[in-house]
Image: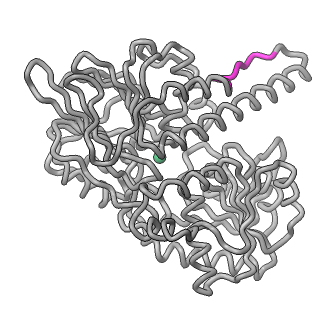
Amino acid sequence: MKLSFHGADRGVTGSCHLIECAGKRVLVDCGLYQGGRELNEQNGGPFGFDAGSIDYVLLTHAHLDHCGRLPLLVKRGFRGEIVTTAATRELARVVLVDAARLEEEDVRHQARRAQRRGDRPAAEALYSVLDAFQTMEHFGRTGSYGQPLELAAGLSVTFLDAGHILGSASLYLECQERGHRRSLGLSGDLGNRGRPLLRDPVAPSRCEALIMETTYGDRLHKSVRSSVEELYQAIEDTHRRGGNVIIPTFALERAQELLYYFREGVEQGRLSRRLQVFLDSPMAVSATQIFERHPEGYGPQVATMLQAGRDPFVLPGLHFVRESSDSMALNRIASGAVIMAGSGMCTGGRVRHHLKHNLWREECSVVFVGYAAQGTLGRQIIDRVPIVRIFGEDVRVRAQVHTINGFSAHADRDELLAWHRSVGPERTFLVHGEEVVMQQFAAQLTQTTAEMPALGDVVEL
Ligand code: ZN
């Protein structure tokens, strides 16, 4: 078995790992690099392998940093099969088409700008909406949690609950090579235990080697309950001051989880029944509808609600905003609104408009409920840079800024350590984390030494 590393190596985005075993070439994830121009430019670079030679792509989940380079893979000659859970397949369609649309829009804007300057348009879209649709044709079999799926003779994969987002999975790969049984675990992104929407992560049984994420390998999260209270409090305080609450939201999972807590808060009288919540993201709206169709992906509480015909994501003052004209109309609301919009790191999307209109007002709040990578607008606001640039304009950061980390969809250090212990691998490869975080996490792994592959590294097992 041969492993090679082609993304999220000593970094948190662009997940892409190649496994060669039993005569097959299996790619696990093919994610986009995100955050800052330098990283974005990396997306168009070579993969480090021949796209046409890949037999299978296994997706751990539908986040863009795990699936966002798939259309490029297809564009460059991939003709194999993409295997996922059923929910990931549906979510990936929404995510990829949306990414392609944004990519096309972005290139059009740049071309117009170049024309106005009298330059020739240089940029070309990474991939088109058509490429995204063509990618969907490569989605083949789907895996069910806990049931081994034979990819080819002597090669099988088992999808296991990762508890990160709907459909997310850790993978357990088994293959027969020259009469030997080899095994490899891949964590994908791991979620927290004891959350209301999803089941807890399940660790693969003992494997020879493990490729593991380390996003929050250096810190402990506050309990989700205290985070929910903090969120309710931030909303109440802001509305009392006469402002709006802007929540930069990842469209998958986080948006639905917040809706779940808003509904609960209103039902329990912790939030006003008049609370007006705007989910201003066509992708989040579609994702919410997909969530409603997959009771099999949930923990018992939510599955029971869905089966009884109760929608866990709906509250009286909820508005789904799809059209951009309706989104723009939100700029006229001076107070009393909770606006959730993407992107979560504020690198693009409608949230930038809402920030432009609310960030300079001290009565407003911006509530971060997720990770914002170095170099993103989100991180600048969290770090309270006095002035940020949005759409070419300087905007003063005067709103209250809350960072509530208990909603994280990523396991914290202790959860990662416990998960690693129950796998007990002979060799561990750390990926998907900032390098300093990885080093700190590696130091905690007392029973084994962990390796931190660099981009392009190749390992024979
Ligand atoms: Zn993820």
Any part of residue 380 in sight: no
221 relative to 205, above or below: below
Image coords of residue 7 (percent x, y)? 43, 30
Image coords of residue 206 (percent x, y)? 15, 45
Residue at the farthest left position: 179
- Left or right, 155 with respect to 128, comes to left
Q: Secondary structure of the magenta portion, mostly?
A: loop
- Left or right, 213 with respect to 74, comes to left
5 relative to 285, above or below: above
Q: Residue at x 69, y 80 (%)?
A: 236
Q: Quadrant of residue 81?
A: top left
Q: Does the magenta portion include 127?
A: yes
Any part of residue 430 in sight: yes
Closer to the camera in the image, 50 or 58: 58
Closer to the camera in the image, 113 or 77: 77
- Left or right, 325 with respect to 264, comes to right
Image coords of residue 244 (percent x, y)? 77, 69
Quarter of the image where the N terminus is located: top left
- Left or right, 58 with respect to 253, comes to left
112 relative to 364, above or below: above
Q: Which segment did they paint magenta?
A: 121-128
Q: Residue at x 49, y 25 (%)?
A: 138
Image coords of residue 253 (percent x, y)? 53, 56
